[in-house]
């Protein structure tokens, strides 16, 4: 029995050293055969148990079984170790570190924001200040001060969303004319970009939320020619050197005379043939403009005999339609990455 125990201990030690030294599955398998196989060392020992006195056999059998269990467990653990190492090495081989990296996706300015920024930059170069106002405005600033009394029919075209506190989501940026003139004496020169809201049904040319860029210049001796010059050059800045503007007589209660401002259709360039962009007119409408009405000047305490000025309000998405030759204004708010990347 002592002999057997010693032999077992010796076997187990040798087995452990060999198992740790094995470098692949094949080496482990031959180790298993050499120790636990039909003619293996452990099996030989087990056979020798039969020669022991009967009362020693159960204990000897147990001793052998214990060693077999320890050996099998070690084999299993070593095998597992090889498996995970194989997975790791296969993974390493499949990663090509020289492969070009996937470039980080950088965002870009939204086309509407770009037009606002470029328009403001243009006016700033001409000495204008950029001002922004609140989107919730009172009736006074949206209408009354702009010479639109409450019973005036043109309020209909500025129909917007009422808030519970009696304010209104501004239907145009023209309230900024009043806010600026109340705060400053002439000369004033500002651009006011921002969001506007109207209760319009959404279609290819209308959104209920959109952007405008408002401009206002009041000083001594300002006339319509100044307005025409500034807007012509703005359009050339945004669209290119051959761009023209056209003024069509129109009506706004806060300007006199008033005009709708159009710019050369970027698609047909005014060829006057059939055109899906401008419907064949050769022009794209950008917004309204005119000379500040004397009633508006008086409302803010300016002397109409001494001061005169012009104002305009352009739809930024309209400018976007023309600039990017887009067929549907809704594309600007659809968050379609493919569309936006094309314009980036
Ligand atoms: N506020 C007008 C509109 O939204 C545009 C406009 C601005 C017209 C300034 C004249 C002067 O339709």
Image (cartoon, helix red, strand yellow):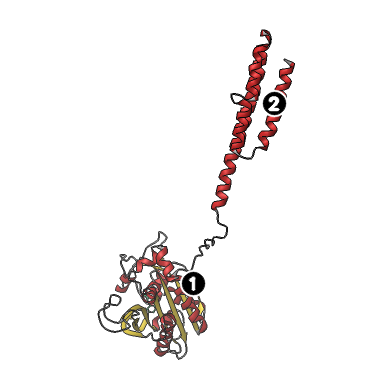
Please tell me which residue is depicted at 40% across the width and 71% down the height of the picture.
Answer: 142
Furthest residue to the front? 39
The secondary element bearing badge 1 is classed as loop
Residue 205, position in %: x, y? 32, 70
Give the residue pinned by disc 1. Answer: 132
Q: Residue 282: image x %, image y %?
A: 30, 82
Q: In which quarter of the image is residue 177?
A: bottom left
Distance from Cα at disc 2 to Cα at disc 1: 89 Å
Identity of the residue drawn at 71% across and 18% down: 4
**Along the line of sight, which residue is nearer the eye, 340 or 137?**
340
Q: How crowded is mark 2: few (under 14 residues within 10 Å), some or many (20 or more)?
A: some
Please give left or right for residue 3 compared with residue 167 in the image: right
User: In terms of image quarters, where does ligand 1 lie?
Assistant: bottom left
State whether label 1 is within 8 Å of ligand 1.
Answer: no
- On the rendered structure, is 82 left or right of 160? right
Q: Name the residue under label 2.
A: 11
Quick check: 163 above or below 79?
below
Q: What element carries label 2?
A: helix
Q: Which of marks 2 and 1 is in front?
A: 2
- Within 10 angstroms of label 1, few (less than 14), some, or many (20 or more) residues? some
Relative to 80, is 120 above or below? Answer: below
Residue drawn at x 63%, y 24% is: 68
Q: As rendered, which of 252 and 119 lies closer to the eye?
A: 119
Is tag 2's residue or tag 1's residue first in the polypeptide sequence? Answer: 2
Q: Position of residue 73 (x, y in %)?
A: 62, 29
| Up/down of 195 relative to 88, above or below | below
Q: Quadrant of the N terminus?
A: top right
Query: At 35% from the left edge and 69% from the top edge, which residue is drawn?
Result: 329
Give the quadrant of the C terminus.
Answer: bottom left
Q: Is residue 281 visible?
A: yes
């Amino acid at each position: 029995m002592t002999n057997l125990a010693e032999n077992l201990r010796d076997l187990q030690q040798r087995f452990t050293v060999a198992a740790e030294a094995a470098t692949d599955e094949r080496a482990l398998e031959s180790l298993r055969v050499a120790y636990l196989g039909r003619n293996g060392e452990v099996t030989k020992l087990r056979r020798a148990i039969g020669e022991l006195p009967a009362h020693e056999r159960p204990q000897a059998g147990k001793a052998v079984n214990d060693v077999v269990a320890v050996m099998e467990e070690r084999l299993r653990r070593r095998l597992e170790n090889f498996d995970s190492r194989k997975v790791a090495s296969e993974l390493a081989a499949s990663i090509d570190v020289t492969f070009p990296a996937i470039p980080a996706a950088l965002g870009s300015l939204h086309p509407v924001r770009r037009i606002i920024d470029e328009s403001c930059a243009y006016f700033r170069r001409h000495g204008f200040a950029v001002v922004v106002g609140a989107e919730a405005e009172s009736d006074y600033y949206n209408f009354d001060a702009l010479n639109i009394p409450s019973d005036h029919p043109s309020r209909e075209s500025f129909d917007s969303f009422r808030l519970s506190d009696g304010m209104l989501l501004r239907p145009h940026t023209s309230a900024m004319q009043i806010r600026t003139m109340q705060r400053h004496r002439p000369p004033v020169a500002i651009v006011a970009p921002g969001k506007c809201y109207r209760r319009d049904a959404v279609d290819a040319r209308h959104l209920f939320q959109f952007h405008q860029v408002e401009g206002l210049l009041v000083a001594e001796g300002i006339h319509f020619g100044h307005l025409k010059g500034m807007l012509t050059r703005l359009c050339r800045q945004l669209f290119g050197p051959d761009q023209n503007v056209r003024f069509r007589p129109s009506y706004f209660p806060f300007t006199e005379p008033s005009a709708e401002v159009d710019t050369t259709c970027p698609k047909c360039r005014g060829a006057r043939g059939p055109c899906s962009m401008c419907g064949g007119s050769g022009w794209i409408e950008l917004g309204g403009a005119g000379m500040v009405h004397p009633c508006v000047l008086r409302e803010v305490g300016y002397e109409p005999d001494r001061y005169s000025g012009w104002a305009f309000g352009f739809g930024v998405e309209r400018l976007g339609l023309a600039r990017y030759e887009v067929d549907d204004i809704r594309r600007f708010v659809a968050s379609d990455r493919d569309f936006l990347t094309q314009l980036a």
